[in-house]
Amino acid sequence: MRFDILTIFPDFFVSPLGAGMIRRAVQDGLVVIQTHNIRDYATDKHAMTDDRPFGGGEGMVMKPEPLAAAVEQARGNGGDARVVLLTPQGRTLNQRLAEELAGEKQLILVCGRYEGVDERFRAAYVDLEVSIGDYVLTGGEPAALVLLDSVIRLLPGVLGCGDSAENDTFSRGSRGGLKYPQYTRPRIFAGREVPDVLLSGDHAAIERWRFLAAVRRTISRRPELVAAMELTPAELKLLRENGISLPSAGVGGD
Ligand code: 9D3
């Protein structure tokens, strides 16, 4: 898969893309990532990428021509690309959207700065607008990194066999619920013991304990996720036997 990142801060991406799983995916030829400095596509002598808003008001707006020229250049590197603008006005990123984007051949990620991009660039070039959540960032760059990370790890061959994407929280393996608590050595830490059942060697009992702990945790912290868990009749019975009732709707917190 190919990613082209349009940004006025290409340095922002150097260290994150040069470490860990993404570095290996690039080395293995599973992904190609190229950053483009939007400033290189500016046409005026000062290489301006932003300008004052028509109509007045606070802040600056990103000029459309450099963005458009950078998109055209990035398109030339591949076939049919999807142009994604990172913006607080976008569709909130979730696992479903990451899976959808992982099916594309090429993504062109446009990182906004200032108060946003000229509306005509958005209308003429942008296929999809994405936000990573309801909090304020300094620009689209950190959001592009998050999107990149969530998509790249889904590509075939990127994850090791040990950590399959199927078993993640939010993916089908844990069926939309949260993961159970995990323990490793030592057996006692900070005066707290590992639950006996996990040391029992009784794998069926361990499976039951983990299932119940995962559901309790999901009900407590993310009750809105419980409805999507598609529990089997046997699992519902187990929950009832353990005094766990499912929320219809409500708020969490533990
Ligand atoms: C203080 C400026 N705000 C006035 C209403 C608007 C604003 C513009 C640009 C707020 C943040 C930003 C920079 N953020 C992004 O470009 C961004 C973002 C985000 O802030 N949160 C979550 N997802 C994203 S994706 C891009």
Image (spheres, rainbow, N blue to C red):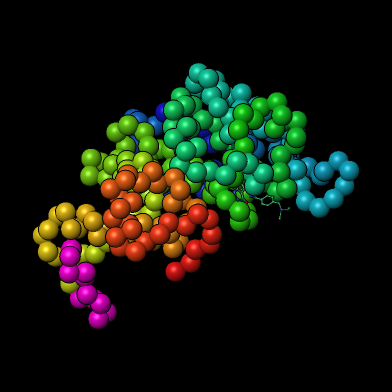
> In this image, 197 relative to 227: left or right?
left
Q: Residue at x 82, y 43 (%)?
A: 53
Q: Position of residue 181 (x, y in %)?
A: 30, 62
Furthest residue in direction right, as rendered: 55
Q: Which residues are magenta?
A: 188-198
Left or right, 109 with respect to 32, comes to: right
Residue 144 magenta: no
Q: Position of residue 139 (x, y in %)?
A: 62, 49
Q: Residue furthest top?
A: 79
Q: Is residue 193 magenta?
A: yes
> In this orientation, which residue lies closer to the viewer: 38 or 64?
64
Answer yes or no: is residue 181 visible.
no
Q: Nearer the viewer, residue 218 or 59?
A: 218
Q: Position of residue 222 (x, y in %)?
A: 47, 57
Image quarter of residue 162: top left
Quadrant of the frame with the N terminus: top left
Q: Residue at x 35, y 46 (%)?
A: 231
